[in-house]
Amino acid sequence: MGDNRTNVYIDREVTSIDEDKKDDILQNFDRFTNYLEDKMELGKKMGLNEDKLTKGAEKIADYLAKHEEPRTREEKLLQALWKVGDTDLQKGLARMLVRLVDEK
């Protein structure tokens, strides 16, 4: 899948989640990481490598930091780290999330 198609797909996925499902996903950190794990498995089946999965995690994290109030201590920490980081640090944090979920 080309980068533009991947970005469009990720953008559509992130912005189209209804409020009830979003609340369910963000209810606790385990549900959030389970959601990421499901999406990463789908991405791997589509042929996405770790760099593209990281880009997807960046988009999700950026969306959440800008549009959602953190609901858990872990989300508050992730949002605070995201907001103080520059682009390189945000990419590093997204990569760590991908690896964290990948090792579950």
Image (cartoon, rainbow, N blue to C red):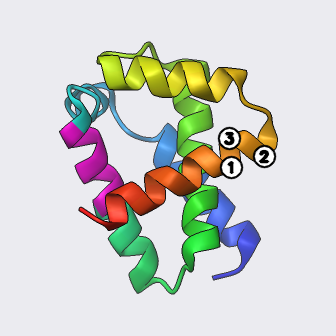
State the residue at coordinates (67%, 60%): 7
Tag 3 secondary structure: helix
Residue range in magenta is 30-37
Binning the other alpha carbons within 10 Å of mark 1 as few (below 14), some (14 to 19) or many (20 upward) gives: many
Q: Quadrant of the C terminus?
A: bottom left
Binning the other alpha carbons within 10 Å of mark 2 as few (below 14), some (14 to 19) or many (20 upward) gives: few
- The residue under label 1 is 91
Which amino acid, by three-letter code, is at mark 2?
Asp
State the residue at coordinates (51%, 86%): 47
Per the picture, the main secondary structure of the magenta-coloured stretch is helix
Which amino acid, by three-letter code, is at mark 1?
Lys
Are the two marked residues, 2 and 3, in contact with CB atoms closer than 8 angstroms? yes
| Of residues 89 and 19, the one drawn nearer to the viewer in this rendering | 89
Are the two marked residues, 2 and 1, in contact with CB atoms closer than 8 angstroms? yes
Question: Could you say where residue 48 lies in the image, as x and y percent from the top left?
Answer: 54, 79
Quadrant in the rendering for residue 41:
bottom left
Question: Could you say where residue 69 lies in the image, as x and y percent from the top left?
Answer: 44, 13
Quadrant in the rendering for residue 4:
bottom right
| Of residues 39 and 97, the one drawn nearer to the viewer in this rendering | 97
Horizontal placement of 78 versus 52: left or right? left
- 5 w.r.t. 31: above or below: below
- The residue under label 2 is 88
Q: Could you say which disc has been placed on residue 4 in the image?
A: none
State the residue at coordinates (47%, 83%): 46
Are the two marked residues, 1 and 3, in contact with CB atoms closer than 8 angstroms? yes
Tag 2 secondary structure: helix
Which amino acid, by three-letter code, is at mark 3?
Gln
- The residue under label 3 is 90
- 76 w.r.t. 13: above or below: above
